[in-house]
């Protein structure tokens, strides 16, 4: 599911993004601060749901909704506002829902469960990722080649985070835990991310990455991962786990205890 969201107030946009991510961590979430930018994106990209702040400078959410529907007639529009007087206008536009501030995960989840236009799951998985045993990445059953070992480890950590945004400092703390974070560490991490991105680009799988201004994550919906399937109680994945998780990385050792406990509980 592809979800767009917009608010021209930076703090409000961050709160909206956080609530949507908590309610739908598997979604491909794209955020915007300006109406023209979201319209430009919608011209060439399909979208399933759009959370629109109604009161914005330059263009209201009501006007934006009409223009978005010109590009994506089936998009589920959900208005976000601190006021209720727009409810009637929202109904005339045949929108999917209406959320009042303060935004919460529960409010977002309720709207996503009751979309006006049902979302058909898309087969968007671009990579097969093996976390049990050693960490390995495959595209069309062929292993991906990484020019730098640490670049592969960055991807391993992003996979482990399951869509959680990771800052440069977060990644540095995992890769270089005994060294203080500074300009040199930041440059190293930046170079590793460039190298990792290049490897994914060459495999035609760069869209797996979700990049923000100061952080990066993966889109779990685009990854077929044994660890993700284990957590969703897939029997074949549970049976495939034999006590090793990303065995080549020391920071991943603590996950083994959690997985062992989960497997014992299930059986």
Image (cartoon, rainbow, N blue to C red):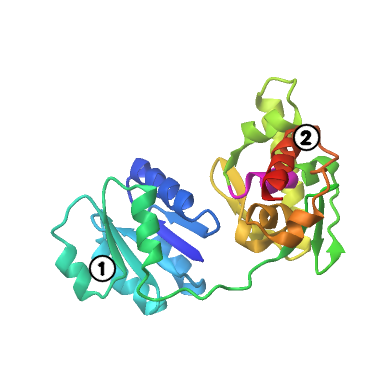
In the rendered structure, the answer to whether residue 62 lies left or right of residue 159 reads left
Residue shown at the point (69%, 54%) measured from the top left: 230
Front label number (1 vs 2): 2
Q: Please state which of residues 21 and 155 is positioned toward the viewer in this rendering.
A: 21
Q: Which residue matches tag 1? A: 63
Q: How crowded is mark 2: few (under 14 residues within 10 Å), some or many (20 or more)?
A: some
Q: Main structural element of the magenta stretch: helix, strand or loop? A: helix
Q: Label 1, label 2: how many angstroms apart (C-alpha)?
A: 52 Å
Q: Name the residue at 83% across, 43% down.
A: 244
Q: Mark 2 — residue?
A: 253
- Rendering coords of residue 129 (x, y %): 76, 56
Task: Determine the secondary structure under disc 2.
Answer: helix
Between 176 and 57, the one lying in front of the other is 176
Of the image marks 1 and 2, the number of the one nearer the N terminus: 1
Q: Name above or below for residue 168 compared with residue 27.
A: above
Q: Give the range drawn in magenta.
A: 155-163
């Amino acid at each position: 599911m592809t979800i767009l969201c917009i608010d021209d107030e930076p703090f409000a946009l961050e709160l909206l993004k956080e609530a949507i991510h908590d309610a739908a961590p598997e979604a491909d979430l794209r955020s915007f601060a300006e109406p023209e930018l979201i319209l430009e994106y919608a011209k060439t990209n399909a979208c399933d749901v759009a959370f629109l702040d109604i009161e914005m400078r330059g263009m209201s959410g009501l006007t934006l909704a009409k223009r978005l529907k010109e590009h994506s007639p089936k998009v589920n529009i959900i208005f976000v506002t601190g006021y209720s007087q727009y409810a009637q206008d929202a109904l005339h536009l045949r929108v999917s829902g209406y959320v009042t501030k303060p935004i919460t995960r529960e409010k977002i989840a309720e709207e996503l469960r009751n979309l006006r236009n049902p979302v058909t799951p898309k087969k968007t998985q671009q990579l097969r990722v093996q976390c049990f045993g050693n960490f390995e990445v495959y595209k069309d059953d062929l292993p991906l080649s990484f020019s730098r070992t640490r670049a592969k480890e960055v991807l391993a950590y992003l996979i482990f985070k399951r869509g959680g945004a990771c800052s440069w400092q977060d990644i540095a703390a995992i890769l270089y835990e005994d060294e203080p974070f500074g300009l040199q560490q930041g440059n190293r991490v930046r170079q590793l991310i460039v190298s990792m991105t290049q490897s994914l680009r060459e495999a035609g799988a760069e869209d797996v990455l979700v990049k923000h201004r100061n952080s990066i994550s993966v889109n779990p919906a685009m990854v077929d991962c044994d660890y993700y399937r284990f957590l969703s109680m897939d029997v074949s994945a549970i049976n495939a786990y034999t006590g090793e998780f990303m065995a080549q990385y020391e920071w991943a050792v603590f996950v083994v205890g959690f997985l062992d406990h989960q497997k014992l509980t299930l059986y």
